[in-house]
Structure formats: C-alpha cells, structure tokens
Amino acid sequence: MYLNENFLLKDKNVSTAGDTMNMPRHRWYYYKEGFSPNLVEKAIEMLSLSENDLIVDPFNGSGTVTLTSANNCIPSIGIEVNPFTAFIAETKVKSSTISDFDRYSNYILDKVKKKKESPLLKFSTFTEFSGRTKWLFNSEVLNSYNGGYTNLKNIKNKDIQSIIKLALIRTIMENSNVRRDGKCLRYRSNWKELNYNNETFIKSLENRLNIIREDIINDNKLISPDILCGDSRKILSANRLNEKFSLCITSPPYLNTFDYTDIYRPELFLGGFVNSMEDLYKLRLKTIRSHIQAKWERPIINDFGTMYATSMSEILNRQDKLMHKNIPLMIQAYFEDMLNILSVLRKNAKSDAQLWLVVSTSAYAGVEIPVDMIIGELGNKVGWYLKEIGVLRYIRKRKTRYSKDINNLRESVVIFSAEK
Ligand SMILES: C[S@@+](CC[C@H](N)C(=O)[O-])C[C@H]1O[C@@H](n2cnc3c(N)ncnc32)[C@H](O)[C@@H]1O
C-alpha cells in the first residue's frame, strides 16, 4: 500500500552513479556502486535543510552524501567500513593551493617515469610471474605506480599526499588488464594488445591530475564532513555521533551476495589499506551480512514480519534450487543487520528527522524477496513511521539458472519519518 509507482524520482537515474563521472570532485574516483548526488540534493531541498542540520550516511561508500552535503554547506557524518572507500570519501573533499599541487604533481610524475620495483610483483595474480596466463597488471605498470607511491611520503602536506595517492590508484586501475563487471573483475577482451606500460600510465596520470587541478581551481568553500572508518552497527550503537541528525540518507549493501572487500581487493592492497589475506578476512567479517564469503556469526532473530516469513518459507521449499546452501542464513542475517541499523538510527534521529534508504529486491531460487517492503515493516517495529516506498526503477535481471523466471528487480527508496 505504501509502494509509490509514480514517485517523483522514478526513472531519473538517481540510484546509479553514472552522472558522477562528469561532476566536479565526485569524478575523482568512479565508484560503480554509488548513487547520484541528485538524490541527495532532492532530499536536502524537500526537507529545506540548512547549516544547522546534520546529515548522516552509515554506508557512505565513496562519499556521495558527504560531498553533496559539503557542497551545500551542511555538516555531515559518513561511516564506511572499507578503508579504501572511506579514503575516497575523505580525499574528495580535500584542497590545496595550486602552486603546491603543481609542484608535488610534477615531483610524483618524475618518480613515476623512473619507476621502482613493486613489492607486489609476485603477489597473488597481480603480475605475469611463474607461468601465469592472466594477470591484473603488467609489471611495468605496477613498477610505474610504485615509483610514485613509495615517494608519496616525501609530500609534507598530508592533503596533497592523499589527493595524489587517490590519483595514482585510479590511474593504475585504468591501466589494469581488468575492468569491474558486476560482482567480478573481468579481463578486457583486448588486454594483451592494449599493452599498458610506463607511457600509458604517465598519460593517464597527467590527465587525472589535470581534472583534479581544474576542480580545485573552481572550488567553492567546502564544509569538511566527518568520515568515520568502521562498522556502522558498532559506531552507531556506541553513540559516537555526538549530535542527532535531521536526515539520514543511505544505501546499504543490497541483499545480492556482492562482497565489496573482494571487488576492491586490488585497491585495498595497492594503497596499503590491508597488508595480508588475514587483514582482508578480518575486514570482511565487519561488513553487513549480505554475502556468503565469510563465516559469520549466526543470526538469532527470525521474526521480520509477514512478508519476510512468506518469502523465506517459499525459499526453504526450493532449497535444491539455491546457488549455495547458506543463502537462507544470509537472508536472515541481512534482515537482522537491517533491523539493528534501523533501531540504532532511530536513537540518533532528531524528532523531525527523515530516513531515506535506497534498496533493491533480490531473487533466490525463483523467489523475489521484497526487501523494500520488509524494511518498511522493520522500521515500523523500531519506532519509524513509513511515509512511502518510492519506486526508482526496475532493473533488468540477467537470466541465471537459479532464478529463471524473474526478469526484473525493483530499486526503491524507503522513506521514514521519526514523527507521524
Ligand atoms: C551501496 S554502497 C554505498 C555507496 C554510496 N551511496 C556511494 O554513493 O558511494 C554500500 C557501502 O556499505 C559499506 N559497508 C558494508 N558493510 C558496512 C558496515 N558494517 N559498516 C559501514 N559500511 C559498510 C560497503 O563497503 C559499501 O561501500
């Protein structure tokens, strides 16, 4: 009954990050799983928020919410568990004088030209060692990156250090033999012919630094957000926000077995955010239980309303059609996490606050789980009032042998208010 098929943002591409590729500062790192700044702008406008308000995003990703808030001079707090992604969010709001930026850019470009042997040369599938047929980076690319990376420490200004580090990481990914495709990294069809090397790396880095330079020159004054790196379930329940929010706008991981720590593994290692597979696994354990890549704590609660109960019983009846035996447990754990987040957010909300959650339905064993409506029911349970579920778009679903009959998934924004 709350599902609004005529929501004002329907089919306006606000649940995707495509437009960030051309937007100042947002374009410093393209984060495929992000949403559009226009969604945040719309919420700010609808709630008439000002510099006296606080905006919060507990799944801040690349910082779309915190950068948009900063552009509107509204204080904000973003929480993000993945240290690489939190670094993107932190860095996109940093500035510098142009003379310092130029000086250090030239210094790092010179070091990149000279290259330096990378300690990651023999790591995993990073380069072409010992009879491998495929590798993520040609060794010259990795050594070019490392020439710049090892000399970042000589940049005394920490803000410029971060900005150039982000540019280097973006550049190496542009010069990598793979590209992101859904849940995996896929080899470019012509990666061998592309033959990425020191020259291509330098060209991409120059281009990247020019884009950043342009954005710094055209800057308005930004209000710095607070970016907290950690598990939002813990941070919010420990009351670390200090102040209550007027708007929480966010997109939690979808219930789609997508593991952000896996897909961003190259960047995590390249930037020194994790240093071993053990570190990576520890990080994975702190993420929302929306995938099956970790041995999670088992969920305890199993009462998430009638719609959840119906979907779960249909799925359990078709267990033999599931792609993995742990899917039912993952679904249960996901809603336990969502219930927890909704509840801690309610405690941190001002009396007239709103909560906007962008989510998508999911399909397992031919059963579509109405994640938006289940979350609507969960919010009501912990003191939120469901205003509406605004449909943003229907996404065509790739046919898989596990959910043959489901062709579309629904992406929507679940909007709650703290008072009736
Ligand atoms: C859909 S993305 C958010 C993208 C963001 N709206 C943007 O525009 O960049 C969800 C994010 O939640 C993060 N995440 C997963 N588990 C988390 C946790 N326990 N605490 C905080 N962040 C978490 C993921 O690393 C991912 O960056």
Image: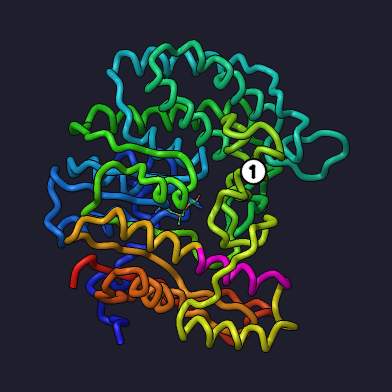
Rendered-image quadrant of the N terminus:
bottom left
| Residue 96 visible from this viewpoint | yes
Q: Report whether 21 appears left or right of 244.
A: right
User: Which x, y percent locates residue 271?
Assistant: 57, 31
Which image quadrant for residue 325? bottom right
93 in relation to 47, above or below: above
Q: Residue tagged by mark 1?
A: 282
Q: Is mark 1 within 8 Å of ligand 1?
A: no
Query: Residue at position x 66%, y 17% from top?
Result: 116
User: Which x, y percent locates residue 389?
Assistant: 31, 76
Question: Magenta span covers which residues?
Answer: 324-336
Dominant secondary structure of the residues highlighted in magenta in the image: helix
34 in relation to 373, above or below: above
**Residue 330 drawn in magenta:** yes
Type of residue at label 1?
Lys
User: Which x, y percent locates residue 20?
Assistant: 35, 49
Q: How was the colour assigned to the protein in this rendering? A: rainbow
Along the line of sight, the residue nearer the viewer: 293 or 385: 385
296 in relation to 22, above or below: below
Mark 1 Cα-neighbour bin, 10 Å: few <14, some 14–19, many ≥20: few
| Residue 407 visible from this viewpoint | no
Q: Secondary structure at mark 1?
A: helix
**Residue 326 drawn in magenta:** yes
Count of numbered marks: 1
Query: Residue at position x 42%, y 52% from top?
Result: 59
Along the line of sight, the residue nearer the viewer: 255 or 135: 255
Rendered-image quadrant of the C terminus:
bottom left
Which image quadrant for residue 194? top right
Q: Report whether 319 appears left or right of 308.
A: right
User: Which x, y percent locates residue 323?
Assistant: 71, 73
Along the line of sight, the residue nearer the viewer: 180 or 281: 281
